[in-house]
Image (spheres, rainbow, N blue to C red):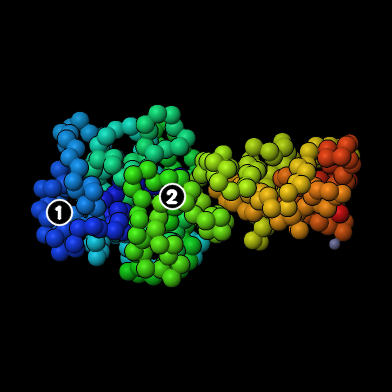
């Protein structure tokens, strides 16, 4: 869940029905819900979102507001871009690098303030409303994800960062932000809004201006991507609640295997090159039961199974992971990730058509890769 909901600049790509010059000339007072201490919005701010500018939300007194204290990493700056604010790199960031550890508030507050302390020690306070925040799918009621400075991040259909959720408490959400490719000094940090919002209730970008050759033309939430676009966006997906909504919506023939929920005691998934493998997390004696498993019988070859683990998602490849049976493909769930070895340390025995057990063929140590023939 990485929403970059509430930052005004994040809406900058919204197509304006107001002529650009007229919008730019609109007075700042037309945005009563937003004020800035120690800084003023760029003149073009109203061009960001004429729809928002037309709304009148009673500004709450600062004392009544939720205050969110944040720190801007040394590698980034909040900058003024063509249509408003954005985030830019002030240090080169390499592909795969952790750019920062992010967090946002989970709250039903209608307005809040975030204070940004920069590396130089200066502090700016932004008073914002929750109009552009993202509804939190995992919370009950009207809880939204209220962002700090990274709410200024803009959308691109070809993002250069991803931000998988790492943990949450009752009132905060934490996520890691990784570079998807090299980001040079002066480059804008861009995320794909479609991978953290299912429907973008009320704030879709009808005409995307991200300018990428991969631009989809609009940004209306994950639900509205084509099936192929959804598959392409999987590596960037930021929370599994989107997967659950995708499956539940039945807009595509897709099912989801949450590997964390399926993993037996004593076994875990580890990264293996670009793929995954199974490893032992405790010792097993030769002959000991490692796990029992029930395979899925896939009768419709058009079915797409997505496997997810710790914020990463992969489409199951039935050629690679399935076992052809009479009239169906046996898909062994998490066990599809077990690596082959000509000298395997486990042996498999079927108990019925789809149920089987896996036992240690020799002593297995915690940390060992689990293999089968
Ligand atoms: Zn685009
Ligand atoms: Zn072999």
Rendered location of residue 199, percent (x, y): 43, 45
Rendered location of residue 193, percent (x, y): 41, 53
Residue 202 sits in which quadrant? Answer: top left
Question: Which residue has dot 2 on it?
Answer: 221
Rendered location of residue 155, percent (x, y): 37, 58
Residue 135 sits in which quadrant? Answer: top left
Is 227 above or below relative to 354?
below
- Left-right relation of 284 to 205: right
**Depth order, front residue of 355/79:** 355
Mark 1–mark 2 Cα distance, whole angstroms, equals: 31 Å
- Tell me which numbered mark, 1 or 2, is placed earlier along the sequence: 1
Label 2 Cα crowd, 10 Å radius (few <14 / some 14-19 / many 20+):
many
SS at mark 1? Answer: loop
- Left-right relation of 256 to 162: right
Residue reaching furthest top?
A: 141
Quadrant for the C terminus, please: bottom right
Question: Which residue has dot 1 on it?
Answer: 40
| Residue 230 image label | none
**Depth order, front residue of 278/203:** 203
SS at mark 2? Answer: loop
Rendered location of residue 97, percent (x, y): 48, 61
Q: Does the residue labelled 2 lie within 8 Å of ligand 1?
A: no
Label 1 Cα crowd, 10 Å radius (few <14 / some 14-19 / many 20+):
few
Quadrant for the N terminus, please: top left
Q: Is mark 1 within 8 Å of ligand 1?
A: no
The residue depicted at 58 percent of the width and 43 percent of the height is 250
């Amino acid at each position: 869940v990485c929403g970059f909901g509430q930052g005004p600049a994040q809406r900058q790509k919204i197509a304006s029905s107001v002529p650009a010059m007229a919008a730019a000339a609109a007075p700042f007072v037309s945005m009563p819900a937003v004020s800035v201490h120690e800084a003023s919005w760029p003149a073009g701010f109203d061009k960001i979102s004429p729809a928002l500018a037309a709304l009148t939300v009673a500004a709450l007194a600062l004392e009544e507001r939720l205050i969110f204290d944040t720190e801007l990493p040394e590698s980034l700056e909040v900058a003024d871009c063509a249509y408003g604010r954005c985030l830019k790199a002030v240090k080169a960031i390499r592909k795969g690098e952790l750019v920062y550890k992010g967090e946002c508030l989970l709250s039903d507050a209608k307005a809040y303030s975030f204070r940004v302390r920069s590396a130089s020690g200066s502090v700016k306070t932004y008073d914002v409303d929750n109009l552009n925040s993202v509804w939190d799918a995992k919370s009950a009621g009207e809880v939204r994800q209220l962002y700090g400075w990274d709410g200024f991040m803009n959308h691109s259909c070809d993002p250069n960062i991803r931000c998988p959720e790492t943990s949450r408490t009752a009132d905060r959400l934490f996520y890691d932000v990784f570079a998807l490719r090299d980001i040079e000094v002066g480059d804008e940090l861009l995320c794909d809004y479609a991978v953290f919002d299912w429907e973008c209730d009320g704030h879709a970008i009808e005409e995307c201006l991200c300018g990428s050759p991969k631009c989809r033309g609009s940004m209306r939430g994950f639900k509205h991507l084509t099936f192929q676009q959804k598959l392409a966006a999987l590596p960037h997906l930021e929370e599994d609640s989107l997967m659950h909504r995708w499956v539940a919506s039945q807009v595509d023939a897709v099912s989801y295997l949450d590997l964390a929920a399926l993993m037996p005691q004593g076994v875990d998934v580890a990264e293996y090159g670009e793929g995954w493998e199974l490893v032992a997390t405790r010792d097993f004696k030769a002959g000991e039961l490692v796990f029992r498993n029930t395979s899925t019988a896939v009768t419709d070859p058009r079915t797409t199974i997505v496997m997810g683990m710790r914020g990463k998602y992969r489409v199951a490849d039935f050629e690679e992971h399935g076992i052809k049976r009479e009239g169906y493909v046996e898909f062994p769930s998490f066990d599809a990730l077990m690596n082959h070895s000509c000298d395997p340390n486990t042996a498999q025995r079927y108990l019925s058509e789809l149920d089987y057990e896996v036992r240690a063929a020799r002593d297995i140590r915690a940390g060992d890769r689990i293999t089968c023939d």
